[in-house]
Image: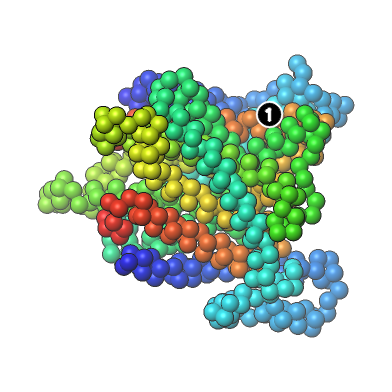
């Protein structure tokens, strides 16, 4: 409990740190927001109009004043107005987030469904040819950058089957579930591939560790079937490192997959941040980064708690 | 020498070592301009030429030789990866040692700063730094270096803290050794093993991040070649000239595979505790 409180107490500190870094960094990007927003038309503005726009978006003040205002707004759940969209930042983020969340969940599902059985299979055939096969596949999987895989998938589909991945306007899950799944399945496989490889490797090594433990030997000597030993006795303990790894990867995926979203033309959080940075949309960059960092920290905290729940021997907060 | 022997005795070490060695050779040849063709020369008549005896990996939209561009691209990607990992190792080691040695407030302050940096997804932090400093080779080095510094700080701080509490450090202090001597002779020397493993694995990530930045157009700038940029350029020509995508794609994959294999082997060799777990 004290551990949880201590971790939660650090949260605001780290978030303030993150926000200051972003706040200062994005203002150091060359060029100004008004020009980035209006493009060549910015040249048509009179100095008065320009000043009025800057005042409207609150970017006419020195950075620390802007920061103070922004922080005050944050306490009221107000992240400012996006210069690109002309709407509240929080609305824009929450509009994009479901896609990113769904993609992250789908990728994790693929990784676990493929990775855990593959790892267990390899561990039970330790040092045999099939184990070697799984290990080589996992190593190659882990070394394949997702953007290379994405292009290979698109190429294979178009050259081999004459089909292109479903792009076009994105269909949210609750409006058109089938179309939505069709649009997300390839990106999810792309992101889930290396993820599955990591899960395979870690489940295999964890399973190997557990299989040599005394309690597994006891279960065996008591006459438990091989299947029961593996799935009932060994696997639950071997899953602990898998939970940690999956949680951390999931936390990263919640930050949006910038490149994969770009390749598959998906309007997720990753592309939102990239565009916001390129557009110098100060408020949007700040809001997105804070949102992503917050999610990441929450997920990490949950992983730690799950870790302690799965293994009662672990007492958090003690060294 | 002993390490080299151990790497050669280790299967994935042998394969990883061979791959990394081959890439280093290609990178050197690429950097010194010893390529089959000039990577920037445009052979207009031979635009989008399929792989042949004259152009081993074909030519691109401008009639430039893909094999030569691949070699200079590898040189470019490796330069960025090496310098950025060197930056991260140096900065991370200094910060990690400082946190462990000075302890208390310094430790708290430094590690909270690292927490802040770690709360950013890697590519996002790199993007932000590139946006501030403008895209280019040295910006990529700086961005990737900063992104991976917290990891090295953590790798150094943990073991340094436990080493600091060991008897031989107390003994050295009693004998009147200076802090600098203890830090370098007793702490740093014992950290070489975990650092070596981390450096090898970080090189794989750095190659990946560099390729990602270049893919987004924020890393190496045209007309210079880089693996990520070549891959990005290949996207619209995928069906007419698949070689433009396949060769750089496979080149990136195998380079990362090489460092991953080597890193795993080094972890096996240098950290006996991990030996079973990784296999």
Residue sitting at 51 percent across and 49 percent down?
A: A249
Q: Position of residue A247 (x, y in %)?
A: 48, 51
- Graded by Cα atoms within 10 Å as few (under 14), some (14 to 19) or many (20 or more), the crowding at tag 1 reads some
Residue sitting at 67 percent across and 25 percent down?
A: B35
In-image side of A306 versus A196 (left or right):
left
In-image side of B125 versus A147 (left or right):
left
Chain under callout 1: B
Figure quadrant of residue A192: top right
Residue A124, compared with residue B175, is above or below; it is above
Looking at this view, is B82 or A3 the one in front?
A: A3
Q: Position of residue B214 (x, y in %)?
A: 66, 45
Q: Position of residue B118 (x, y in %)?
A: 47, 56
Q: Which residue is the site of mark 1?
A: B247
In-image side of B82 versus A288 (left or right):
left
Figure quadrant of residue A62: bottom right
Instruction: Give the number of callouts.
Output: 1
Q: Residue furthest top?
A: B53
Residue A286, compared with residue A300, is above or below; it is below
In-image side of B155 versus A180 (left or right):
left
Q: Is residue B248 visible?
A: yes
Quadrant assignment for the C terminus of chain B? top left
Quadrant assignment for the N terminus of chain B? top left
Looking at this view, is A204 or A50 the one in front?
A: A204
Residue sitting at 35 percent across and 27 percent down?
A: B3
Looking at this view, is A117 or A86 the one in front?
A: A117
């Amino acid at each position: 409990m004290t551990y949880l409180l201590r971790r939660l107490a650090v949260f605001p500190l780290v978030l303030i740190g993150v926000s200051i870094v972003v706040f200062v960094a994005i203002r150091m990007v060359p060029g100004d927001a008004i020009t980035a927003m209006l493009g060549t038309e910015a040249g048509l503005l009179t100095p008065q109009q320009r000043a009025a726009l800057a005042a409207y978006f609150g970017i006419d003040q020195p950075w620390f004043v802007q920061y103070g205002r922004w922080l005050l707004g944050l306490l009221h759940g107000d992240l400012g107005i996006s210069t690109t969209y002309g709407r509240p930042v929080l609305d824009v983020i929450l509009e994009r987030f479901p896609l990113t969340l769904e993609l992250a969940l789908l990728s994790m599902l693929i990784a676990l469904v493929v990775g855990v059985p593959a790892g267990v299979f390899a561990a039970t055939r330790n040092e045999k040819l099939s184990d070697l096969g799984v290990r080589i596949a996992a190593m190659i999987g882990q070394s394949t950058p997702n953007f290379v895989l994405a292009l290979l998938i698109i190429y294979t589909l178009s050259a081999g089957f004459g089909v292109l991945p479903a792009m076009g306007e994105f269909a949210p899950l609750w409006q058109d579930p089938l179309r939505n799944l069709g649009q997300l399945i390839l990106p999810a496989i792309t992101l889930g591939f290396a993820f599955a490889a990591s899960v395979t490797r870690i489940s295999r090594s964890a399973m190997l560790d557990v299989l040599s433990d005394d309690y597994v030997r006891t279960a065996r000597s008591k006459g438990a079937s091989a299947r029961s030993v593996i799935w009932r006795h060994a696997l639950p303990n071997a899953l602990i490192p898998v939970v940690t790894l999956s949680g951390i990867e999931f936390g990263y995926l919640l930050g949006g997959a910038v490149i994969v979203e770009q390749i598959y033309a998906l309007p997720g959080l990753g592309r939102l941040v990239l565009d916001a940075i390129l557009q110098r949309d100060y408020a949007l960059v700040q809001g997105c980064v804070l949102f992503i960092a917050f999610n990441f920290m929450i997920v990490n905290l949950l992983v730690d708690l799950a870790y302690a729940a799965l293994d009662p021997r672990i007492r958090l907060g003690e060294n | 020498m002993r390490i080299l022997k151990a790497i050669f005795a280790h299967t994935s070490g042998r394969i990883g070592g061979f791959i990394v060695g081959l890439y280093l050779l290609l990178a050197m040849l690429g950097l010194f301009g010893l390529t089959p063709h000039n990577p920037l020369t445009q052979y207009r008549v031979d635009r989008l030429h399929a792989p042949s005896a004259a152009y081993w990996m074909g030519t691109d939209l401008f009639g430039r030789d893909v094999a030569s561009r691949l070699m200079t691209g590898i040189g470019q990607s490796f330069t960025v990866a090496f310098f950025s990992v060197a930056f991260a190792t140096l900065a991370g080691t200094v910060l990690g040692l400082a946190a462990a040695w000075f302890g208390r407030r310094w430790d708290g302050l430094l590690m909270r700063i690292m927490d802040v940096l770690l709360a950013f997804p890697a590519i996002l932090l790199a993007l932000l730094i590139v946006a501030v400093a403008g895209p280019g080779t040295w910006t990529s080095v700086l961005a990737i270096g900063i992104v991976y510094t917290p990891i090295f700080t953590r790798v150094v701080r943990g073991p340094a803290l436990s080493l600091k509490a060991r008897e031989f450090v107390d003994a050295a202090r009693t004998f009147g050794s200076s802090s600098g001597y203890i830090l370098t002779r007793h702490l740093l020397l014992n950290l070489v093993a975990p650092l070596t493993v981390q450096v090898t694995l970080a090189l794989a990530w750095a190659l990946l991040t560099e390729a990602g930045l270049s893919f987004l157009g924020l890393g190496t700038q045209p007309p210079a070649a880089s693996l990520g940029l070549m891959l990005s350029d290949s996207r619209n020509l995928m069906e007419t000239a698949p070689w433009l995508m396949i060769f750089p794609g496979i080149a990136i994959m195998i380079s990362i595979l090489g460092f991953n294999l080597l890193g795993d082997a080094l972890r096996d060799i240098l950290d006996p505790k991990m030996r079973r777990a990784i296999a």
